[in-house]
Amino acid sequence: MKQVLGNSKALRANVSLLGKALGDCLKKREGKKAFELVEEVRNLSILARKGDARAIANLQKKLNRLSVDQKALVLKAFNQFLNLANVAEQQQRIRRKRSLEQRNSKQTHTYSLEQSFADLKKKGFSKSKIFDTFVDQDIELVFTAHPTEVLRRSVIHKQHAIAKELSILDTPDLTKWEEIESRQGLERNIHALWLTDEVRRLNPTPRDEAQWGMTLVEDTLWRAVPRHLKKLTRLLRDSTGRELPIRRTPLRISSW
């Protein structure tokens, strides 16, 4: 899939790709009539959002006539699509960030560390002041210990797998067979996501909460925190000539 990095066209392409895969999954798993029902509601919703009075009335009538099972199906389909759109948006942010950080790019992300260093230099802060400002930070990421996490770990893992396939499809020199393989990977994970119960049927135990916390650590923080500290060290060295002290930890993880 050839896409322009940082371009909203790439986001629309990914959303369209995921939406089509979800539609194919719906037809295969629930039948053609179920797919047509969801499509009818979706098209009426698009027109209703634009202020079409007739579409609003027809949408209300349609929804009122649906059985409980049909309503559950429509809600699930819409919820799945929104979750997949969120995955595509996250991939777009990653794509844009990478585009701005290309080797010869002079642009920096508004909220990036690079931009923070550049702003402090522009405002005339001394090297020692910049160094002390970053080194003296005391940021604490706190894990809450209560059953408020909506998504199950199995759902999160499948969403991560979908995001990984989208990342592969962004590769500029992707071969035809690699593209086919990644598209098939998307389809498999979307089918698996559709068949996965998103709702917790039982109240989570303390062990469940601990396992969810470890999932976050293993899937995200285990890589992100060291990468952030390495980047901070490099920027400190380039901007002030001094590195982050080995015993200094400006970012800590804790829990209630």
Image (tube, rainbow, N blue to C red):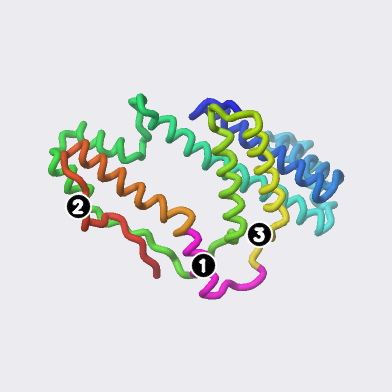
Mark sitting earlier along the chain (3/1): 3
Return the mark for residue 198: 3
Q: Is residue 153 left or right of residue 54?
A: left
**Most foreground residue, 81 or 40:** 81
Residue at horizontal 80 percent and vertical 40 percent from the top? 40
Asked if residue 161 is among those painted magenta in the image, a careful observer would answer no
According to the picture, the residue beneath numbered tag 1 turns out to be 211
Return the mark for residue 235: none
What is the distance, in whole Å, between disc 2 and disc 1 at their CAs? 33 Å
The residue stretch that appears in magenta: 201-216
For the residues bearing labels 2 and 3, Cβ distance under 8 angstroms: no
Return the mark for residue 245: 2
Residue at horizontal 81 percent and vertical 52 percent from the top? 64
Residue 169: image quadrant is top right
Q: Is residue 98 left or right of residue 237?
A: right
Q: In this view, does 166 lie above or below 249?
A: above
Mark sitting earlier along the chain (2/3): 3
Q: Position of residue 19 (x, y in %)?
A: 69, 39
Residues packed near mark 2 inside 10 Å, few (<14), some (14 to 19) or many (20 plus)? few
Mark toward the viewer: 2 or 3: 2
Residue 170 shows in this picture: yes
